[in-house]
Image (tube, grey):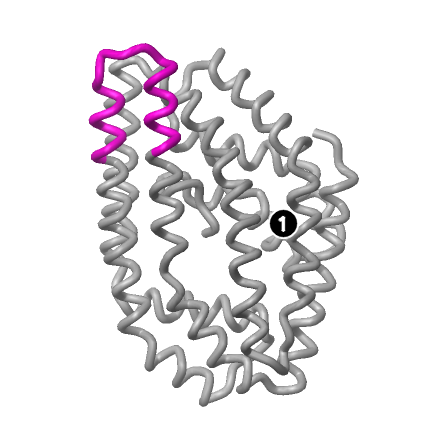
């Protein structure tokens, strides 16, 4: 999941749009129309907010979605310039995509930092407990489960995968496993930083900035790992005609989803 620094797993609205592209046309419209409610629900699973805080969060998310249409509009041209015949095209487009992602993720992190900075001790304790439990859950998933999930995701996009492609995934299994460990360690480090910040007796303004800076540092560290980019580049030469057709269909569906989003007022 593209996330906002680790603990906000699967709440990034660009990912929601991408996932919606795998559904039927009617479901696409529903997914986009209620994207704000979905994101709000995902945040509230992790941030123990009071009723009044939830009302403010809802308005913040609506404002965020309405104000970031230009950034989302920039994503499709980047994807369009990735050639299915030229793996090297990823080298040029990947930095552009990560820059666009980072801009959006950082702005969303401002919302999270704002709400976390005013936690009461009870909320802080509950938040840290939830983050610890979520991190343990990710780490404890065994290698076979991760392998199956990766194959499922690739199959959803390509329709089916060949023996050669399965071998690529198998050959890189240790990298995927190592990434889970690294991710878990990075999240633990972030949670420790949050604990230190949230327990400081300082005003909400400085606390909010410290939380935001922690999110940004975590996001930049996560994006510094380009191993998946190299694996994707090794995949491109193996694509079969039907797989390319399936991939182009998914991209066309994604473009429809993005257009729905651009037309939707939250």
Residue 130's image quarter? top left
- Relative to 168, is 259 on the left or the right? right
> Relative to 205, is 80 above or below?
below
Magenta run includes residue 197: yes
**In the image, residue 85 lies at what x, y percent?**
63, 82
> Relative to 86, is 249 above or below?
above
Query: Which of these two is toward me, 6 or 230?
Result: 230
Magenta run includes residue 130: no
Residue at 34 percent across and 28 percent down: it is: 211
Name the residue at the right extreme: 263
Query: Which of these two is toward me, 181 or 122?
Result: 181
Tell me the element at label 1: helix
Read off the residue under disc 1: 17
Residue 143's image quarter? bottom left
> Relative to 132, is 228 above or below?
below
- Relative to 18, is 233 on the left or the right? left
Residue at 60 percent across and 75 percent down: it is: 159
Residue at 50 percent across and 80 percent down: it is: 235
Mark 1 Cα within 10 Å, few/some/many (few <14, many 20+)?
A: many
Magenta stretch: helix, strand or loop mostly: helix
- Relative to 260, is 81 on the left or the right? left
Query: Which of these two is toward me, 163 or 107?
Result: 107
**In the image, residue 209 lies at what x, y percent?**
38, 24
Residue at 28 percent across and 44 percent down: it is: 187
> Relative to 90, is 31 above or below?
above
Q: Which residues are magenta?
A: 192-213
Query: Which of these two is toward me, 91 or 236?
Result: 91
**In the image, residue 60 lies at what x, y percent?**
57, 23
- Relative to 118, is 199 on the left or the right? left
């Amino acid at each position: 999941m593209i996330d906002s620094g680790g603990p906000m797993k699967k709440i990034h609205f660009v990912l929601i749009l991408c996932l919606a592209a795998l559904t039927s046309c009617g479901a696409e419209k529903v997914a986009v129309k209620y994207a704000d409610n979905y994101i709000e629900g995902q945040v509230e699973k992790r941030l123990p907010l009071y009723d009044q805080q939830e009302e403010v969060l809802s308005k913040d998310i609506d404002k965020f979605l309405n104000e970031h249409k230009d950034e989302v509009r920039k994503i499709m041209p980047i994807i369009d310039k990735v050639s299915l015949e030229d793996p090297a095209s990823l080298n040029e487009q990947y930095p552009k995509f990560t820059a666009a992602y980072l801009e959006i993720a950082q702005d969303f992190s401002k919302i999270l930092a704002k709400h976390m900075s005013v936690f009461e001790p009870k909320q802080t304790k509950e938040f840290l407990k939830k983050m610890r439990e979520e991190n343990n859950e990710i780490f404890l998933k065994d290698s076979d489960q991760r392998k199956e999930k990766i194959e499922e995701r690739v199959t959803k996009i390509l329709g089916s995968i060949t023996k050669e492609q399965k071998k690529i995934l198998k050959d890189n299994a240790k990298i995927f496993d190592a990434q889970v460990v690294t991710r878990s360690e990075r999240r633990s480090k972030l949670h420790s930083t949050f604990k230190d910040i949230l327990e400081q007796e300082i005003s909400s303004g400085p606390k909010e900035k410290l939380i935001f800076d922690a999110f940004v540092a975590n996001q930049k560290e996560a994006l510094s790992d380009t191993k998946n980019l190299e694996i994707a580049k090794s995949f491109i030469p193996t694509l079969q005609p039907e797989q390319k057709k399936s991939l182009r269909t998914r991209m066309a569906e994604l473009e429809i989803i993005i257009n729905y989003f651009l037309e939707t007022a939250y």
